[in-house]
Amino acid sequence: MMRVIHAPENIAGQPATISRAQRKIGIKSDVLVFDKSRFDYDCDYNLRMNRWPKKFHILIRIVAFIICLTRYDLIHLHYRTFLLPGNADIRVAKLFGRKVVIEYWGSDILQTDIARKYTLVDENALNAVYAGIDNEKKRREISTVSRLVDRTIVGDYSLQVYSPDSVVVRQAIDLSHFPYVGVRPHSGIVSVVHAPTQRDLKGTTHIIRVIEELKSEGYPISFRLIENLPHQEAVSLYRSADIVIDDILQGPYGILAIECMALGKPVLDYIDAAFIDQYPGLPVVNTRPETLYKNLRYLLDTPAAREEIGRRGRKYVEENHNSEIIAEKLVALYQSL
């Protein structure tokens, strides 16, 4: 039986989702994290680094790495963070014949000079959120890691521009945790939700302005801004939504959109023209700030469209993001090494 450890960050719960799906297909697969995030995603080992004085951190990492080295055949790293400084864990793992892959998820490899070509985010906001990024240094780091590991992976086609040598394995969702809910084609109060992790990157200011404009015109909207909630609590709010507005600035859709499509909700998201051909059949309502009013008004005026787009979203997720399919693709990749 192949033994895989996912470490040390549980980005958007993706490592946990992948790990649980790998178990279903006969792989021993676990998740180790430095600390749980505020979203409280599932894991098997939590080092609770924030509870220890910093002088003990390196010792804790060394012990954790030794356990990983002795109990697992393959180390699947996530988010360009490592168990030991200076990529020492990769080098030692290779000496002991272990396979190592790393999966990138976004800001870990983002380079602002490239990002500007594929985003509508104001340059000042982009520089503020990603302050201090040295693009050339980051490119050197990505190149170094690429030479050390057995394979690099990105979780979406839009990330491949930052790491061209990486293979794309798309985001995963456990559909058993997201049973289809759909939306009722009603003409009463319409529940609209928006759940930004970074307001300046998601277009939250534009969204609030358009919501207020539509309300002033008499549209019966109940708007909910969801922030800093545990994941399960946030999902319970998505279930009752009629419309979900995700990210109208950065382009391609992320985990929030996938979860809401799985629930059968119509989702508004910005998909950059450079990547749109990679997502045939994607039922997301492609939206940017200047089209938000028109697109949102259309969904408010057309209850049947909300229901139909929601049904198509569920089918799309089943075909493209089912965690068991993603787990099989990753295992095939591991075996190819």
Image (tube, rainbow, N blue to C red):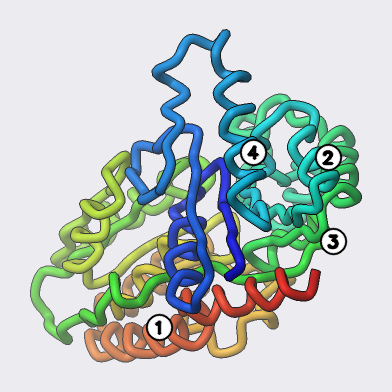
- Marks 4 and 2, the one that precedes in the sequence: 2
The kind of secondary structure element at disc 3 is: loop
User: Quadrant of the rendered structure where residue 101 is?
Assistant: bottom right
Contact, mark 4 vs mark 3 (Cβ under 8 Å): no
Q: CA distance from mark 2 to mark 1?
A: 43 Å
- Marks 3 and 1, the one that precedes in the sequence: 3
Residue appearing at x 89%, y 42% in the figure: 144
Instruction: Give the amino acid type for the residue marked by disc 3 in the picture.
Output: Pro
The residue beneath circle 1 is: 313
The residue beneath circle 3 is: 164
Instruction: Give the amino acid type for the residue marked by disc 1 in the picture.
Output: Gly
- Marks 3 and 2, the one that precedes in the sequence: 2
Q: CA distance from mark 3 to mark 1?
A: 29 Å
Q: CA distance from mark 4 to mark 1?
A: 30 Å
The residue beneath circle 2 is: 91
Contact, mark 4 vs mark 1 (Cβ under 8 Å): no
In which quadrant is the N terminus drawn?
bottom right
The residue beneath circle 4 is: 126
